[in-house]
Image (tube, rainbow, N blue to C red):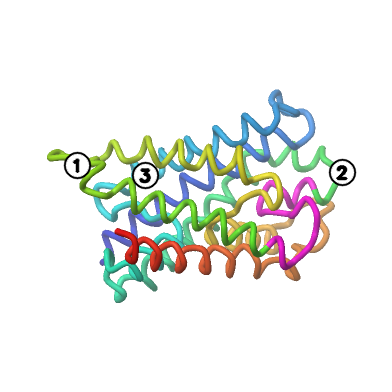
Amino acid sequence: MIEKMLFEFLGTMILILLGDGVCANVSLEKTKAKGAGWVVVTFAWGLAVMCGVFVAGPYTGAHLNPAVSIGLAIAGSFDWNMVLPYIAAQMLGGFVGAVLVWLYFKDHYDATDDAATKLGTFCTIPAIRHRGRNLLSEAIGTFVLIFCILAIGNKANTPELGLGSLGAFPVAFLIVSIGMSLGGTTGYAINPARDLAPRFAHFLLPIKGKRGSDWGYAWIPVLGPIIGAAVAAVLYMSVF
């Protein structure tokens, strides 16, 4: 269990370092990538997931996401006894990854005046704040993530040899697809460890000019992904 937790921690840390890193890179003042846009963000997040999967995959299956762990457990593909240890490792990895992003871009955080921009490099902020529809967006996005992950792992899609580490590639493009198609409403957290853990980092770090960490919204990118994962797992078991 210790080995599995270590690699879930490392994989999630890499995921958040690169994922929140691109948010900082395209948003903060005086970076060379400022204003690079949504296509860069979505592709970088997909590649961040791929890198995290390569790190953790051989040891843990590379969940890197509490919603994935819960969804796989509901689908009977993962031991419920491992869910909480995995989630603990994922949350800690997400926190450390976000701290590393702040350290890396410290000068650019100091050069950026807008507090919302700084918060947006750590966690998600809805484009239009409507809690019901924001929750639905996160639930649907995570439903697609979990349902497609389960489908990717279907033996009919992985004849004889199985996907193995190659599973990182379809999952990476799945993340890109979700971001490009469904990400514009809430910033597509689809992962409590991607949102809640970095939000805690934002809350605790001595970031120049920061304001609140938007705790009133923080439950949505936690509950929405869990709902979406549960529905995806139940539907997948019913259909397949």
Count of numbered circles in the view? 3
Q: Nearer the viewer's eye, disc 1 or disc 3?
A: 1
* Residue 39, image quadrant: top right
Residue lying at 27% horizontally and 39% vertically, measured from the top left: 165
Alpha carbon distance from label 2 to label 3:
35 Å
Which residue sits furthest right? 113
In the foreground, 221 or 92: 221
How far apart marks 1 and 3 lie (CA) works out to: 16 Å
In the image, residue 182 sits, relative to residue 137, either above or below, namely above
Q: Label 2: how many residues lie within 10 Å, few (<14), some (14-19) or many (20+)? A: some
**Which residue is disc 2 drawn over?**
113
Tag 2 near tag 1, CB within 8 Å: no
Of callouts 2 and 3, the N-terminal one: 3
Kindly identify the residue that appears in the image at 29 percent across and 53 percent down: 61
What residue is shown with label 1?
162
Q: Identify the mark nearer the N-term, 2 or 1.
A: 2
Is residue 125 on the magenta stretch?
yes
Q: Is residue 9 magenta?
A: no
| Residue numbers of the magenta segment | 117-134
In the image, farthest residue toward the bottom: 81
Q: Position of residue 93 (x, y in %)?
A: 47, 56
- What's the amino acid at mark 2? Asp
